[in-house]
Image: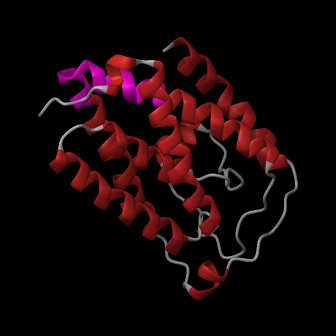
Amino acid sequence: MAVLLSTASQMPAFFVYLEARPGALLYDPILNALPPVDLSGPIFVLIYVPVVYAIIRSLLTPTVLIHFLTGYVLLLLTRILTLWITPLDPPLALVPLVDPLGLVLYGGIPVTRDLFFSGHTATAFLIYQCLPSKIEKRVSGVVVVLMVIGLLLQHIHYAVDIVAAIPFAYLCAKATAKLIPLAGGQNENP
């Protein structure tokens, strides 16, 4: 928790830094084939409802909480590193994401250069990895797919940002299971 809170407190300044620096504009044939659409509302629901569910689920099963929080810290630190080493300009047809909670977390500034890799996709996939039951995995798997579609249609990320988020989240979840053996043995049913 200390690492998470400490890191989170520095994120607004980091996002100001990201927004101020120039980056590369990528050619993305997938985005070019899709008309941009504002899906801020559905994306907001697709990220925050699973996070709230994971937190509530964690209260019932502490191993889920340990796994999720540790995985999220690893994911956040990995994402900071990748954002720092891959300066990118946002896609040309980006439709800004309207996220009231995100604005609070980002220090009140609209953020468009937090691209490689997608935090929305990675968080949704990390939740998928952390939930123990088959039904929870099925539902969260659908959420991941819908999230990917929504992010692509809104042109918030390049396709590579979204695709890369899956293995990063997977590796963070697996590293968590190795770091904390208790979190790796999730055979509990809801």
Drawn side of residue 46 relative to residue 61, left or right: right
**Direction bottom: furthest residue:** 33
Q: Quadrant of the C terminus?
A: top left
How many numbered discs sit on the rendered protein?
A: 0
Of 162 and 152, which appears nearest the observer? 162
User: Furthest residue to the left?
Assistant: 190
Percent position (x, y) of residue 174?
46, 35
Colour mapping: secondary structure
**181 over 113 or under it: above or below:** above
Q: Position of residue 23 (x, y in %)?
A: 85, 58
Q: Residue at x 46, y 24 (%)?
A: 178
Picture coordinates of residue 166, whole percent (x, y): 50, 53
Quadrant assignment, res 69: top left
Nearest to the observer: residue 57 or residue 181: 181
Q: Which residues are magenta?
A: 56-71
Nearest to the observer: residue 90 or residue 122? 122
Instruction: List the single residue furthest toward the top.
Output: 2
Q: In the rendered image, is residue 12 in sight?
A: yes
Give the residue displayed 79% in from the left and 51% down from the top: 86
Q: Residue furthest right?
A: 22
Q: Is residue 61 magenta?
A: yes
Vertically, is 13 above or below 3?
Answer: below
Where 129 sits versus 70, above or below? below
